[in-house]
Amino acid sequence: MRTLSKTQRRAACVSLLATALAAGACSDINVPDYNRAGTNDLVSSPNKTLVDAASLGLIQNARRDAANRTRLAGIVGREVYYLDPNESRYTTELVTGAIDPSSFAGNHDYLNPYGTIAQGQLILTALDKVLPTEYTDAQKEGIRGFTLTMMGNDLLIVAALHQYGPTEVPNNPLDPPAAMKTQAEMYTQAAKYLDDALPHLAAGGGSFSFGPLPSGMAGFTSPANFTKFNRALRVRLDILRKDYAGAITHLPSTFLNASATTRAQFNTGVYYTFSNASGDLQNGLNSGSPEVAEPTLRTQAQLQAGGARDQRYLDKVDSTGSTQSRVGIASNLRFRQYGRAGTGLFNPYVAAANGQSAPLPWIRNEELLLDRAEARWATGDKAGATTDLNQVRVNSGKLDPIAQPADDNAWATALLYERRYSLMYEGGHRWFDLRRFDRLATLNDYPRLGDRIPTYFPVPFIECLARGGSGSAPGCP
């Protein structure tokens, strides 16, 4: 990789930041155009209309990558394959593990999250400039808490996927790019964003000044209830970095329902929402024949007492389609939870037939209960961990309970099974889980000899160029 001059580096930085700001710009929100008022007005002459629109824009920006992240991380985690004859990289880069940092996969979930962070920084600054007659103090606090939560969520995504990245975005596009940080540093900053949001949300009054929030946030539309979503994200972060004591501390402040037995109770949570409305974003996980589910989801699904397979498999996967085959990968299985083939049981907000407008789980109660099981085992409460695991296993999977595993290795195997089937095709969880338990190598040489599981997605090529090329920063080999 060649080294760029200072001028070339500056140009690369400008291009990246400008695109990041545009990705989250409030002109992209479904509100009146106001003569294309956007980032410049938010900086120079902010008002309530602009700040409210920009706040809603954080949600719009967060969902941009959600469906494709589920697909790409699902491919590297061997949940799904996308056998598109017009785009070979789904079966070369992503399945072989040799992801090109300049390709769509290498750049995925980097630009838009930093767009959220950049816009969040602008919102926090703009709030101090808005006339005091336009907001109450409580309304400003609610926006601050909401904004910091969204910034924490998106930085968490970058850290989990890419391992290296900045923790902030320069406000001036002509400034040098922000320093590249390690995954641990990104997790620390994401946790700080989430934790810093709490006092603001606590002082945010009874409702947010902007809205309405999407239907996928039903039940979490006030600052007080949104705090439970914030804490759920904090638990996800705790689990990803194996801070199990932290997870135990934060779980009681989430929306965890540890006695859940019904599908509706397990589904309680926050969802990314989509629609077929003109100009809106559709759920792309409803794409027909190129997309197939990993065959071992069927063969490795455990059996209920009556002989049927794990209920989660039956609810989410359909095996009646024709076999699709490409470059040595074949399957007749399709995912059905996004409405194309069936029940919609894992999507409580829309009818099953509306696949392109089917919501995608952001975080559900079922995940939190499995998080608590993992954290309990790691902090010594093995009986409690087994109880939580069986709560999910028996009621969601309709399987017989298991006895307390004999050791940590047996526990990890049991937990990973439940997480695989509870959270399949909801955000790439299997890949994250196998990495956390140092089991990614168990998927190497599958589905073809020589295929490998990448540990992380690369830092995008342009990020390294902006910093001087190869070897210029962590993550730029």
Image: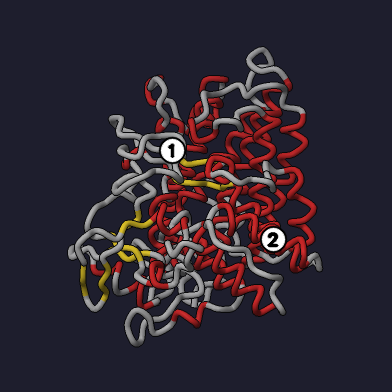
- Give the number of the mark in front: 2 or 1: 2
Q: At 44% across and 50% down in the image, what residue appears?
A: 66
Give the labeled residue for mark 1: 273
Q: CA distance from mark 2 to mark 1?
A: 28 Å
Give the labeled residue for mark 2: 373
Residue 40 in view: yes
Closer to us: 442 or 42: 442
Closer to us: 94 or 38: 94
Horizontal relation, residue 114 to residue 133: left or right: left
Horizontal relation, residue 420 to residue 27: left or right: right
Q: Single out the residue that lies furthest toward the bottom.
A: 449
Count all numbered tags in the image, as a single digit.
2
Q: Position of residue 394 (x, y in %)?
A: 59, 57
Label 2 is placed on what type of residue? Ala
Label 1 is placed on what type of residue? Thr
Horizontal relation, residue 476 to residue 383: left or right: left
**Vertical relation: 351 (above or below) 361:** above
Closer to us: 221 or 394: 394
**Vertical relation: 14 (above or below) 140:** below
Q: Position of residue 339 (x, y in %)?
A: 33, 44
Marked residue nearer the N-terminal end (2 or 1): 1
Q: Which SS class for mark 2?
A: helix
Q: At 65% across and 61% down in the image, what residue appears?
A: 389
